[in-house]
C-alpha cells in the first residue's frame, strides 16, 4: 500500500451501500466518526471497501501505537491460534498471562511490589480499580475531574464528565463521585493564569473540596488522566500531578492514573506519568496494550491488589490468550522499533507545522501536545474563545473526503486530535498534514494559503 490514493469519491458506492445496511441493522446510538468502511489496513494506512487508500491519523482511537497488523503481532496471534483460543483464565491459566503481568509490573512507574489483573477494556479496568480502592481503603468516595473520560459502563459514566453523548439519559449513576476542575490552562475554571496561579487546581482547590464538599477521610482515591484524552488532549503544567500526588499522600488517598489513551509510547515515554515524575498507586491501561486486540489491565501496589476477597475480581474473557500474546509482541515492537523516541519526533513535526498555521489562522486557538498526542483547539475570534465546533466538523469532513482519517475530541467538540500509529512514515505524516492544512484553509476562506503553495 502506498500513500493516499482515491479511486472514488468518499464515501464510494460500496461504502454507501454498507451505510444503508448499517442504518437498518445497527442502533443509531452507535455512532460512526467517518463515512468509511475498511477492507484492509497496514502500518498507518487504510484501504476502504471501494479500493481507496487513506492515511490513518485516528489509530483506532489510540489502539494502534505499534501500527496496523505489525508482523510480530500477527505471527504471535497465528501461533497461539494453533494451540487454543480460550479456556477462561479462572479455570485453566496459561503462561502468556503471567508473563504479561510480570512485564507490566516491571515497566510501570514505581519501585514497589506490584500485581496486575487483566480485563477486556479500559472501562472495565476503571470499574475494577474502583473496586480495589474501596476494598483496600474502606473509603467510598472517588474524586475525578471536569473534562475527564473514563468509559461508558456505569462507574465509567459516573466518572466521565461530558453529559452528551456519554451519560445523559442513563441516570441514576453510581454515587460518592466528586468532580473538580482539571488543569486546563487555556480555559481555567478559576480564571487564573499559570504560573501565577501557583497550581491552585492541584492543591488548594482539592483542600477546599475536603472542607466544603467531601471530607478527606472518606476519599479512597483520586482518578486522573495524566493527559486528558476525550476531554481534548489537555496537557497539564509540569507541577500539577506532583502537587496532586502530594495531597493524596498527605491524606492517605490513593492516586489512580488512567493511562488508557496515554500509555505505551504515545507521549514519548512508555507511560505519561513518567514525564511528571509521579508513581501512581494504581495504573490503568488498555487500547494499545493489545496491539489491536481487546485487552485492559489494572496494575497496582501488591497489597492493594490483594485486598479484594478471593473470587471478588473476575472476568470471563479478560486476559484472553490471543490478546496476551498480541500484547507481548506489541510491547516488543514498541521497544525494538524505538517507538517512544519516534513519538517525540512525530510530535515535533506536528508542532512545527501547527504553530505556523496558528500564525496564519486565528481559528487555531491552542496547539498542544505531549509526544505524539497532538491536538488543535479551534475557536471563533471572540474574547470568550467560543468553540468552533461546526468548523471542526467541516475540517474533519474535508480530511475524510481527501484521504485522511481524523477525529475530534473536547468537551465542546472543537478539538482535532491526532493519534496516528507511531510507525507512520515522515512522508505519510506530512502528506496527511498537508490535507489537514488545506482543510483548515478551506474552512477559514483562506484557500490561497495551502500546503501545496508552500515553498
Image (spheres, rainbow, N blue to C red):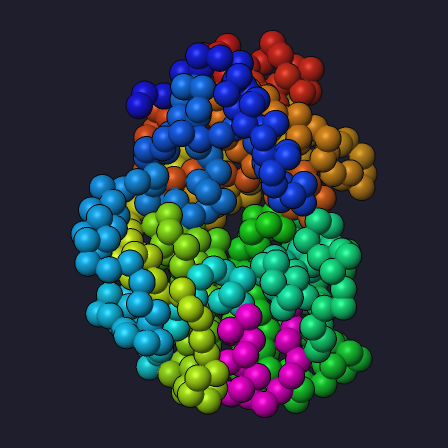
Q: Position of residue 62 (x, y in %)?
A: 46, 47
Q: Is residue 217 above or below residue 445?
A: below
Nearest the eye: 329 or 384 = 329
Residue 24 lies in what quarter of the image? top right
Q: Position of residue 335 (x, y in %)?
A: 25, 52
Q: Position of residue 43 (x, y in %)?
A: 32, 35
Nearest the eye: 210 or 169 = 169
Nearest the eye: 89 or 157 = 89
**Residue plotted at (54% across, 27% down):** 18
**Residue plotted at (27% across, 73% down):** 93
Q: Is residue 449 left or right of residue 218?
A: left
Residue 205 lies in what quarter of the image? bottom right
Q: Which residues are magenta?
A: 127-145
Nearest the eye: 408 or 328 = 328
**Residue plotted at (47% across, 60% down):** 121
Q: Is residue 435 left or right of residue 380?
A: left
Q: Is residue 214 above or below residue 263?
A: below
Q: Is residue 400 left or right of residue 40?
A: right
Find out whether residue 139 is within the magenta segment.
Answer: yes
Q: Position of residue 444 (x, y in %)?
A: 68, 20
Q: Is residue 428 above or below residue 69?
A: above
Q: Quadrant of the image for the N terminus?
A: top left
**Residue plotted at (40% across, 64% down):** 317
Observer able to see residue 55: no
Find out whether residue 398 is within the magenta segment.
Answer: no
Q: Quadrant of the image for the C terminus?
A: top left
Residue 83 lies in what quarter of the image? bottom left
Q: Is residue 11 above or below residue 352?
A: above
Amino acid at each position: 500500500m502506498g500513500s493516499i490514493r482515491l479511486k472514488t469519491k468518499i464515501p464510494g458506492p460500496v461504502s454507501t451501500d454498507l451505510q444503508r445496511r448499517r442504518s437498518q441493522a445497527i442502533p443509531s446510538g452507535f455512532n460512526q466518526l467517518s463515512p468509511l468502511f475498511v477492507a484492509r489496513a497496514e502500518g498507518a494506512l487504510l484501504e476502504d471497501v471501494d479500493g481507496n487508500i487513506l492515511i490513518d491519523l485516528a489509530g483506532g482511537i489510540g489502539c494502534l501505537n505499534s501500527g496496523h497488523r505489525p508482523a510480530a503481532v500477527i505471527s504471535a496471534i497465528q501461533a497461539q491460534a494453533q494451540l487454543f483460543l480460550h479456556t477462561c483464565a479462572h479455570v485453566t491459566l496459561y503462561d502468556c498471562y503471567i508473563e504479561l503481568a510480570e512485564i507490566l509490573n516491571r515497566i510501570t512507574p514505581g519501585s514497589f511490589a506490584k500485581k496486575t489483573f487483566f480485563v477486556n477494556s479500559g472501562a472495565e479496568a476503571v470499574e475494577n480499580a474502583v473496586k480495589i480502592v474501596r476494598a483496600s481503603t474502606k473509603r467510598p468516595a472517588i474524586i475525578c475531574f471536569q473534562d475527564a473520560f473514563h468509559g461508558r459502563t456505569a462507574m465509567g459514566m459516573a466518572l466521565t464528565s461530558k453529559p452528551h453523548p456519554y451519560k445523559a439519559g442513563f441516570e441514576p449513576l453510581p454515587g460518592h463521585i466528586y468532580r473538580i476542575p482539571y488543569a486546563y490552562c487555556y480555559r481555567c475554571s478559576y480564571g487564573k493564569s499559570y504560573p501565577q496561579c501557583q497550581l491552585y487546581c492541584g492543591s488548594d482547590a482539592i483542600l477546599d473540596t475536603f472542607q466544603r464538599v467531601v471530607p478527606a477521610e472518606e476519599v479512597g482515591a483520586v482518578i486522573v488522566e495524566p493527559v486528558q484524552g476525550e476531554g481534548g488532549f489537555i496537557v497539564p503544567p509540569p507541577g500539577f500531578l506532583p502537587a496532586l500526588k502530594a495531597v493524596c499522600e498527605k491524606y492517605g488517598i490513593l492516586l489512580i492514573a488512567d493511562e488508557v489513551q496515554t500509555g505505551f509510547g504515545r507521549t514519548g515515554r512508555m507511560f505519561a506519568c513518567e514525564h511528571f515524575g509521579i508513581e501512581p498507586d494504581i495504573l490503568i491501561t488498555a487500547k494499545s496494550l493489545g496491539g489491536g486486540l481487546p485487552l485492559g489491565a489494572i496494575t497496582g501496589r501488591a497489597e492493594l491488589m490483594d485486598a479484594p476477597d478471593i473470587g471478588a475480581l473476575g472476568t470471563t474473557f479478560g486476559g484472553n490468550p490471543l490478546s496476551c500474546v498480541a500484547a507481548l509482541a506489541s510491547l516488543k515492537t514498541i521497544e525494538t522499533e524505538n517507538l517512544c523516541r519516534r513519538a517525540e519526533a512525530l510530535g515535533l513535526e506536528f508542532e512545527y507545522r501547527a504553530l505556523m498555521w496558528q500564525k496564519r489562522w486565528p481559528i487555531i486557538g491552542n496547539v498542544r501536545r505531549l509526544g505524539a498526542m497532538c491536538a488543535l483547539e479551534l475557536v471563533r475570534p471572540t474574547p470568550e474563545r467560543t468553540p468552533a465546533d461546526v468548523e471542526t466538523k467541516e475540517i474533519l469532513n474535508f480530511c475524510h473526503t481527501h484521504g485522511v482519517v481524523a477525529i475530534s475530541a473536547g468537551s465542546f467538540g472543537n478539538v482535532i486530535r491526532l493519534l496516528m500509529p507511531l510507525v507512520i512514515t515522515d512522508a505519510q505524516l506530512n502528506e496527511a498534514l498537508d490535507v489537514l492544512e488545506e482543510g483548515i484553509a478551506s474552512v477559514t476562506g483562506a484557500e490561497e494559503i495551502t500546503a501545496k503553495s508552500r515553498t
